[in-house]
Amino acid sequence: MKDKCITEMLDNASVANLSDNELNEIRAHAKDCVSCRGAYEAARVSAVVLRNRAQASIEPSPFFQTRVMAALREQQAVESVPAMRRLWGSAKALVSAMAVTTAALAVLSFVLPAPATPVVDQTASVYSAESVIMDKSNDEQMTYEQVLSTIYADDDEAR
Amino acid sequence: MDLDLARQAQAGDESAFAEIVRRYSPRVFSVASRFFRQRSLVEEAAQEVFLKAYTQLGSFEGRGSIEGWLTRIATNTCLNMIRGAKRRPELSVSDLSDDEHGWLEQQSASDGSEQRSVENSLVAHDLADRLLAVLPPEDQQALLMIDGEDASIKEVAEATGWSESKVKVRAFRARRKLREAMEKLLKSKDGKRAEL
């Protein structure tokens, strides 16, 4: 018999459930075949281990029934709370957060003063009339508006 | 009678459901014990099974028994609970305790007849759990039912909801993997003994 046949027989069913014929065949072959002897040994011990494990059963405690019924009542109590109330329960946090944010924004808008923004005169010039007339300008190009405002500003001062 | 009990419980009769729990908790515990060894985990799983069963009472049509129906719920509940757990690496001879070494020696030397004692059983349970941990939970389940409890392929298929061919494949694969793990363990144990 081939080694593969022996291992297939061992993997197809537990050693405990093999027929006498099958066991005799395996044992006869295993006498002269080291690898099949190892496989048979392992399968035999595995079968004992499994049988032992299957017998380890825990019995229910005398209070188990009471415990289950209490858990069931608790579950039913949770489920009986109306849907709107449950929805409100979960939305409460969101609504509170929104109210706090609105209040904070109102306080910030009414209590704190608005920051003063400087008025910038776009026509204000950094040039004097003399520098413009004498063409002592820097390399920077002046605009037409800047030239006019500089001249008239000096005239106003003179008056 | 099962159907009457289920209908009464579904209609809100608490005493009928309490009777279902009383009658079938040993069976549910026995299924959960295949997966867990700690009492607290077995009780947690069993409670979960009955709470699920209560909400699914409407789906029990009375074609099979309540026991079969609960066995299926229990199997699936326990598989779901255990699925998240990590599989352990293969057991090596250095992981074995002295008692486990002794037990394996005893089994190798025996002619196949089982030597029973409380101590022996406890050692074998530990060893079984550690060996089975290398298998996926579904394969463990199939193997424990077939080889440990002598359940038929059909019974396992009914309890799990898998097809019969799937049960056969799982059992074959699990048996081979367990045998190979045990073979390695026995070989390395013998090697270690020869070194000494």
Image: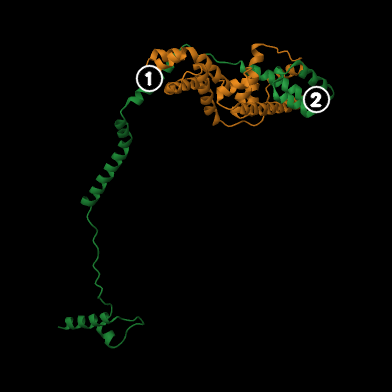
Chain colours: A green, B orange
Q: Residue at x 29, y 43 (%)?
A: A98
What's the CA distance linking mark 2 and mark 1?
A: 63 Å
Q: Which residue is mark 1?
A: A73
| Residue drawn at point x = 73 percent, y = 13 percent | B113
Q: Residue at x 65, y 17 (%)?
A: A51
As drawn, B139 above or below A64: below
| Classed neighbour count for the residue bearing mark 2: other residues with Cα under 10 Å, few (<14), some (14–19), many (≥20) | few
The answer to which quarter of the image holds residue A96 is: top left
Q: Looking at the image, can residue A118 be seen?
A: yes
Quadrant of the image occupied by residue A146 = bottom left
User: Please, which chain is the residue tagged with disc 1 on?
Assistant: A
Q: Provide residue B162's location: percent of width, then percent of height.
A: 57, 27
Work out whether residue A26 or residue A147 is closer to the camera in this orientation and state it. A26
Which residue in the protein does label 2 denote? B194
- Taking the image as shown, residue A24 lies to the left or right of residue A114, namely right
**Is A108 situated left or right of A27 in this image?**
left
Residue at horizontal 72 percent and vertical 18 percent from the top: A18
What is the quadrant of the N terminus of chain A in the image? top right
Instruction: Tell me where residue B22 appears, x and y as whole percent.
Output: 46, 12
Q: Secondary structure at mark 1?
A: helix
Any part of residue A64 in sight: no
* Three-letter code for the amino acid on which mark 1 is drawn: Arg
The chain carrying label 2 is B
The amino acid beneath tag 2 is Ala
